[in-house]
């Protein structure tokens, strides 16, 4: 994580409630715009800080092929999370969703900003399916409100812009490329998955048609990364979700936000892949209920297709942690097998969604 920034630099002119101790919060380097997480706490109070950074500061940028890295550096919207506190968007939140209180934003220079916000004291983690129902219903209401033409039209990007870019860059590099590595797929951890390999190859050839179909669906401005980790449950108000970490802020098909809600905790190793079928079966009807509550109806087939298609593109091709294959680290094989099961489910779920179309 590097050296801890100076307390005074991070705070700028902000005045916390009293003397405090600044501590780093561990995080993965997977998020290109995240330059650090910190907690400042004192007697009876705590603030949370997220440093947003231009993607050129991202340590993993050098691992990408140079042309892809340059395009990524040029186009990645590293400040988009600040839309979370834009009154245009906070006005769209239905009852049951809120944003963390914003204490202030400090310009650190060199395309970095420190965002100081409420440190949400969370309820214990839960795999409660009713919680998935509630979050899906609220996402449906929020997405319906953000499908207003006046809101979609203010965004400069074309339909499904983020997903198109992901399919153009990440999927070939991290997903389709490894499918052609015979030695990789001969490894004992993958040797029994020849059918999955062929299914992924086949779906790779369908990518242009998948995206073209999504572009014809009803659009909204989504949360973009609506995993349970980004819908915090406050301990003092467990009926409310605190929304954090916006992403993919371009018009995307209604149903897109269900993808991260489905796979987020499985990606993190907190929900077994065996639960994915039941979660998927519950969140779609709940989401449709949320749409209907806001007057968006007769979109059932379209939403089911957008959900299955977009989560397949975003998480189905490159969900295997191939860098861990063969590792003797404790739990590595189990974690790999869980991702393998997740990938198998996403493929089967997508193929089932296309039957009869």
Image (tube, helix red, strand yellow):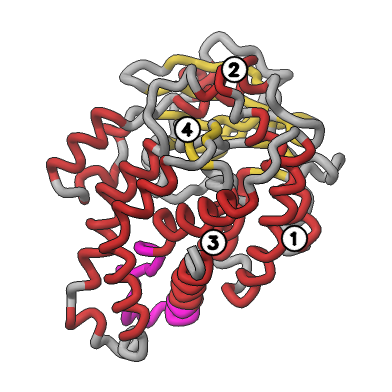
Question: Answer yes or no: do the residues labelled 4 and 1 have beta carbons within 8 Å?
Answer: no
Nearer the observer: mark 4 or 1; the answer is 4
- Dividing the image into 4 quarters, which one contains the N terminus? top left
Q: Is residue 96 left or right of residue 5?
A: right
Position of 232 with respect to 226 (left or right) is right
**Mark 2 or mark 4, which has the lower sequence index?**
2
Closer mark to the observer between disc 2 and disc 4 = 4
Identify the disc placed on residue 251.
4
Along the line of sight, the residue nearer the viewer: 341 or 148: 148
Report crowding for label 1: few under 14, some 14 to 19, many 20 or more residues within 10 A (C-alpha): few
Q: Residues within 10 Å of mark 4 (few under 14, many from 20)?
A: many
- How would you rate the neighbour count of disc 2 (Cα within 10 Å): few for under 14, some for 14-19, many for 20 or more? few
Q: Position of residue 168 (x, y in %)?
A: 26, 47
Q: Which residue is mark 3?
A: 268
Disc assigned to residue 324: none
Circle 2: element type: loop
Q: For mark 4, give the secondary structure.
A: loop
| 257 w.r.t. 145: above or below | below
CA gap, disc 4 and disc 3: 27 Å
Q: Image height check: is 349 above or below 70?
A: below
Q: CA distance from mark 1 to mark 2?
A: 30 Å
Residue 339 in view, yes or no: no
In this rendering, the label closer to the viewer, 1 or 2: 2
Tag 2 residue: 86
Residue drawn at x 18%, y 81% as measured from the top left: 182
Relative image position of residue 119 (x, y in whole percent): 69, 34
Could you tell me which secondary element the residue under label 1 belongs to?
loop
Q: Horizontal placement of 313 versus 221: left or right? A: left
Which residues are drawn in magenta?
317-337
Nearest to N terminus: mark 1 or mark 2: 2
Query: Label 2 vs label 4: CA separation?
Result: 17 Å
Ranked by sequence position, the earlier of labels 1 and 3 is 1
């Amino acid at each position: 994580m590097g050296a801890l920034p100076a307390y005074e630099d991070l705070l700028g002119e902000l005045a916390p409630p009293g003397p405090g101790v600044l501590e780093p919060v561990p995080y993965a380097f997977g998020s290109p715009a995240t330059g650090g997480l910190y907690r400042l706490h004192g007697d009876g109070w705590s603030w949370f800080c997220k440093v947003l950074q231009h993607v050129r500061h991202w340590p993993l940028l050098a691992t990408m092929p140079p042309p892809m890295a340059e395009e990524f550096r040029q186009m990645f919207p590293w400040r988009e999370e600040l839309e979370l506190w834009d009154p245009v968007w906070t006005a769209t939140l239905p009852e049951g969703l809120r944003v963390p209180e914003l204490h202030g934003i400090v310009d650190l220079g060199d395309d970095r900003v420190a965002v100081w916000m409420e440190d949400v004291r969370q309820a214990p983690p839960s795999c409660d399916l009713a919680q998935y129902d509630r979050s899906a219903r609220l996402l449906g209401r929020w997405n319906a409100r953000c499908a207003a033409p006046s809101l979609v039209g203010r965004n400069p990007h074309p339909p499904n812009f983020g997903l198109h870019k992901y399919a153009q860059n990440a999927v070939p590099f991290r997903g389709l490329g490894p499918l052609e590595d015979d030695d990789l797929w001969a490894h004992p951890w993958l040797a029994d998955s020849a059918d999955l390999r062929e299914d992924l190859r086949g779906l790779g050839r369908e990518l242009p048609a998948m995206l073209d179909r999504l572009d014809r669906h009803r659009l909204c401005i989504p949360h973009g990364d609506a995993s349970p980790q980004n819908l915090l449950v406050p301990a003092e108000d467990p009926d409310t979700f605190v929304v954090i970490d916006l992403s993919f802020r371009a018009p995307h098909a209604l149903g897109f936000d269900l993808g991260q809600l489905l796979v987020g905790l499985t990606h993190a190793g907190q929900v077994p892949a065996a639960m994915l079928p039941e979660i998927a079966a519950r969140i779609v009807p709940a989401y449709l209920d949320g749409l209907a509550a806001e007057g968006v109806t007769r979109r059932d087939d379209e939403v089911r297709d957008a959900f299955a298609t977009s989560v397949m593109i975003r998480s189905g091709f490159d969900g295997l942690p191939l860098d861990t294959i063969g590792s003797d680290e404790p739990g590595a094989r189990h974690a790999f097998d869980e991702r393998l099961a997740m990938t198998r489910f996403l493929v089967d779920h997508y193929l089932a969604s296309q039957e009869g179309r």
